[in-house]
Image: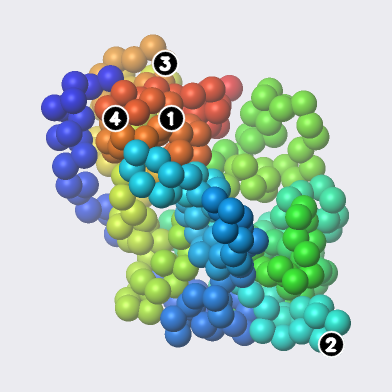
């Protein structure tokens, strides 16, 4: 680990601008008729979660947002959510007399159907669809979960606004009352995900590389709002605005597959013979920058972390252990870095 003074410098350093990779997707469109995101959002847009915190029951719509919005806990840093929500949960607008949702779910942009899961029991997502978009910055994947039915097949080309299926409540723990569309916008972590999964888990992976574990999602609601202000905004341009939460230095064993797939992640001279890579991540583990590092390491090490008084695990999906400037990769964090770097 770096000294406290040096770590502080890491926190205060301003990240240099990313290259202007990628054509604009044109503004992405909303996946249902619910457009309340643009009119205040709140409980008209986000589906609530039943919450009982410190004896107080509530229907918390904020838990339908992206980020650390679930499992509230009082810590030395105040009240925080310790469970991460990868996407956004969009409420239905239309229901029949029995309360069954009727909203159509459509593609947010043109693309190709990369995957469909037709079995609601094989994933917490229930029935879901993944669309691959090629925006000139590497493959980007939108994911539409908890569908009641699916109207497309893998390999099919779709246009923006084309129907993918119907909003529903398939998947674990979702009632008809809480029917919603769970929407994500993701980068793919590894094309060899199945190998990594079989190494670490005894369960069957039904979804190949389109398993949710292999998807790193960004805040699509914030991306929608940013594109309202700047319709030519690219995904790499938006990613540049995401704060770096921690950095991990890893031994260099050649180019990283992720950088080959997403060249806009590269910073510095990747042709140099540096002994390691330093990878910058958001709090959720979304990769932001990959730079050559002069630091020699024999295994992945946390090289920078945002200081906090409570446990780092609360703010990093459990990937980082420790408090303050003390930070190490947890067991799940080491597995995650294996997946990102392809060292398995």
Pick whichever of labels 4 and 2 is earlier in the sequence.
2
| Separation of residues labelled 3 and 4 (CA atoms) | 22 Å
Q: Height in image: 233 above or below 314?
A: below
Pick whichever of labels 3 and 2 is earlier in the sequence.
2
- Tell which of 107 and 77 is nearer to you: 77
Q: Height in image: 300 above or below 152?
A: above
Pick whichever of labels 3 and 1 is earlier in the sequence.
3
Say whether marks 4 and 1 touch (CB < 8 Å).
no
Q: Which residue is mark 1?
A: 320
Judge the density around disc 3: few (<14), some (14-19), many (≥20) Cα neighbours within 10 Å. Answer: few
Q: State how the image is colored.
A: rainbow
Q: Quadrant of residue 152?
A: bottom right
Q: Quadrant of residue 51?
A: bottom right
Q: Which residue is mark 4?
A: 324
Say whether marks 4 and 2 touch (CB < 8 Å).
no
* Disc 1 secondary structure class: strand
Say whether marks 3 and 2 touch (CB < 8 Å).
no
Q: Which mark is residue 291?
A: none
Say which quadrant the C terminus sits in. Answer: top right
As drawn, is 290 to the left or to the right of 202?
A: left
As drawn, is 341 to the left or to the right of 271?
A: right
* Disc 3 secondary structure class: loop
Pick whichever of labels 3 and 4 is earlier in the sequence.
3
Residue shown at 36% from the left, 71% from the top: 226
Q: Which mark is residue 299?
A: 3
Q: Which residue is mark 2?
A: 97
As drawn, is 210 to the left or to the right of 69?
A: right
Answer yes or no: is residue 172 visible. yes
Say whether marks 1 and 2 touch (CB < 8 Å).
no
Answer yes or no: is residue 341 visible. no
**Residue closest to the far top:** 298
């Amino acid at each position: 680990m770096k000294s406290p003074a040096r770590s502080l410098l890491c926190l205060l350093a301003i990240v240099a601008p990313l290259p202007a990779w990628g054509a604009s997707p044109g503004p992405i469109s909303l996946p249902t008729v619910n457009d309340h995101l643009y009119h205040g959002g709140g409980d008209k847009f986000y589906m609530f979660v039943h919450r009982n915190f410190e004896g107080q029951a509530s229907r918390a719509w904020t838990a339908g947002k992206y980020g650390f919005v679930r499992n509230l806990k009082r810590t030395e840093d105040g009240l925080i959510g310790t469970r991460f929500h990868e996407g956004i949960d969009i409420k239905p607008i239309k229901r029949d007399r029995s309360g069954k949702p009727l909203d159509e779910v459509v593609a947010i942009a043109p693309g190709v159907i990369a995957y469909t899961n037709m079995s609601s029991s094989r994933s917490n997502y229930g029935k879901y669809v993944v669309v691959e978009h090629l925006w000139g910055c590497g493959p980007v994947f939108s994911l539409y979960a908890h569908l009641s039915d699916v109207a497309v097949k893998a390999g099919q080309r779709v246009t923006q606004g084309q129907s993918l299926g119907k909003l529903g409540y398939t998947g674990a723990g979702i009632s008809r009352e809480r029917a919603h569309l769970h929407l994500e916008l993701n980068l793919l972590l590894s094309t060899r995900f199945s190998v990594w999964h079989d190494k670490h888990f005894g369960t069957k992976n039904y979804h190949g590389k389109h398993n949710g574990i292999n998807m790193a999602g960004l805040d699509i609601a914030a991306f929608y709002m940013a594109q309202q202000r700047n319709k030519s905004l690219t995904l790499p341009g938006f990613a540049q605005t995401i704060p770096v939460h921690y950095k991990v230095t890893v031994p260099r064993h050649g180019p990283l597959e992720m950088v080959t797939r997403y060249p806009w992640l590269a910073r510095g001279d990747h042709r140099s013979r540096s002994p390691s890579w330093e990878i910058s991540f958001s709090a959720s583990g979304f990769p932001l920058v990959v730079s050559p590092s002069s630091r020699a390491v024999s295994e992945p090490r946390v090289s920078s972390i945002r200081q906090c008084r409570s446990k780092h695990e609360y703010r990093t999906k459990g990937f980082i252990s420790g408090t303050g400037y003390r930070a190490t990769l947890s067991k799940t964090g080491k597995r995650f870095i294996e997946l990102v770097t392809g060292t398995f």
